[in-house]
Image (cartoon, rainbow, N blue to C red):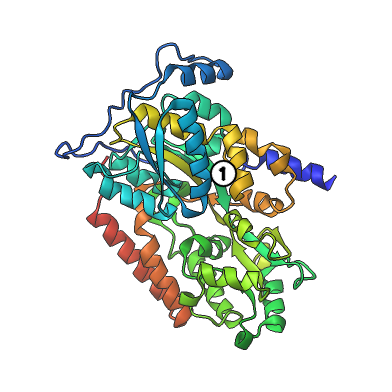
Amino acid sequence: MKKKMLGLLAATFVASSLTACSSTAGDQPSSSSSVKPANEATKQPEGTNQGNNDSAAKTNATAAIKPEPGASLVVWEDGAEVAFLKELAAAFKQQYNVDVKVESVPAPDQAGRLANDAPAGLGADVVMFAHDKLGNAVTAGLLLPNDVFQKETEAAVAKAAIEASSYNGKLYGYPKSVETYALFYNKDLVKELPKTWDDIIAFAKTYNDPAKKKYGIMWEAKITYYNYIFMTAFGGYMFGKNGTDPSDIGLNSDGAVEGLKYYQSLHDILPVKVEDLSYDVKTQLFQEGKLAFNIDGPWSIGSFKDKVNFGVMPLPDFPGGKKAVSFSGVRSYYVNSYTKYPNAAKLFAQFITNKDNALKNFKATGILPANTEASKDPLIANDPLLGGFIKQFAQSQPMPTIPQTSNVWTPMEGAFTAIWNDHADVRKKLDEAVKTIKEQMASTPVKK
């Protein structure tokens, strides 16, 4: 029965968990650029079914679009998945006779690098990043819409993931994966699963031994993505109206201040500076059996398999039964508007995110595919490690897609560092961070 229920959860995992994202309209790149964006006129080709027959639409769309003669592509992929994508590139070459060069570029860096490289003709034809960077990329005129394969994508991917990969109602992404973070635990160290953070605190007080680098729990304590749980649990938020109103910043609201005071108190059970609470450090300690609980995402499953006897559970509740509402994200591939080969690029983005290749990617890397047909496969639906992520994803919030989101990360990182390392006044530091965010937003207004 347990496996059956987990299968049902996995089948509805993507479809039921995200809330809709919306944003303001973007504009086109400067006409003074020496390299012009590709013509966005690779619209639905004639003969593509525009009705409700998704199977026919899928067949017609793929058949109607052909790679440009002599096309070759450059694709950026996150380091851990480069080897797998090279395999798909070889299969694409065999089917379409298009050479694809895969370059390793960290996912968090791709949107920024595209903004610098694309107008000069140096950017990759296909890139991949999380949906929170979509607004900036669209308003800068860096992306082509997912138009040719829109119906096929909408039929294969959950509505919420489609919305997260869209901007101002227009689909741009070819959704690859959905993700949030949860609580990894070492089964050899943890005999009773915690229900609340109070349970975590009690465990850490008996387990910690800093001299031997043994700790009850770790997370990347200066990163807003992970610390968001402390704010939301007590009523804080990033932007109003479900992340769409940049005029309403809730990062220094009373709820955020209360939550960050609780966050600050956890320094007592984790007396380590934020600089030393890095991904590499906590990954190594968890692998070595010195860390009992590790807040991390499904992308790290491969790092622990065959090295740790571990499980994954949802994040524990805060005092008063307050739920830990995590940030969630949708990673998608996007086509560079400056590409010389838009047809080939769109074909490749669609090819690597279809059901079969989404399943292959899960087998190779452990990512949770955005493709709902793939997520229903028993290989994923019956995976015992995914239950914790499925449950946590159900109580997550998507990161905002509006361009102003990019102004948040650095000022908040500074605030978290001072609050944690120096036990600084929480309200004062949050007020300072929000003041900086507002100043940055005012100095770089979003064009509409």
Q: Relative to residue 61, is residue 10 depicted above or below?
A: below
Q: Residue furthest toward the top?
A: 47
- For this view, does 28 lie left or right of residue 169? left
Q: Is residue 19 visible?
A: no
- For this view, does 189 lie left or right of residue 354? right
Q: Residue 302: where, in percent of width, then height?
A: 62, 56
Q: Is residue 281 visible?
A: yes
Q: Write the residue at 44% across / 29% down.
A: 347
- Residues 66 and 436: in front is 66
Q: Write the residue at 44% across / 59% down.
A: 250
Q: Relative to residue 284, is residue 124 depicted above or below?
A: above
- Residues 23 and 8: in front is 8
Q: Relative to residue 138, is residue 181 depicted above or below?
A: below
| Quadrant occupied by the C terminus | top left
Q: Quadrant of residue 300?
A: bottom right
Q: Quadrant of residue 23?
A: top left
| Quadrant occupied by the N terminus | top right
Mark 1 lies on residue? 18
Q: Write the residue at 49% across / 60% down.
A: 225
Q: Residue 205: where, in percent of width, then height?
A: 68, 82
* SS type, badge 1: loop
Q: Quadrant of residue 67?
A: top left
- For this view, does 350 lie left or right of residue 36? right
Q: Write the residue at 61% across / 73% down.
A: 285
Q: Residue 74: where, in percent of width, then height?
A: 37, 41
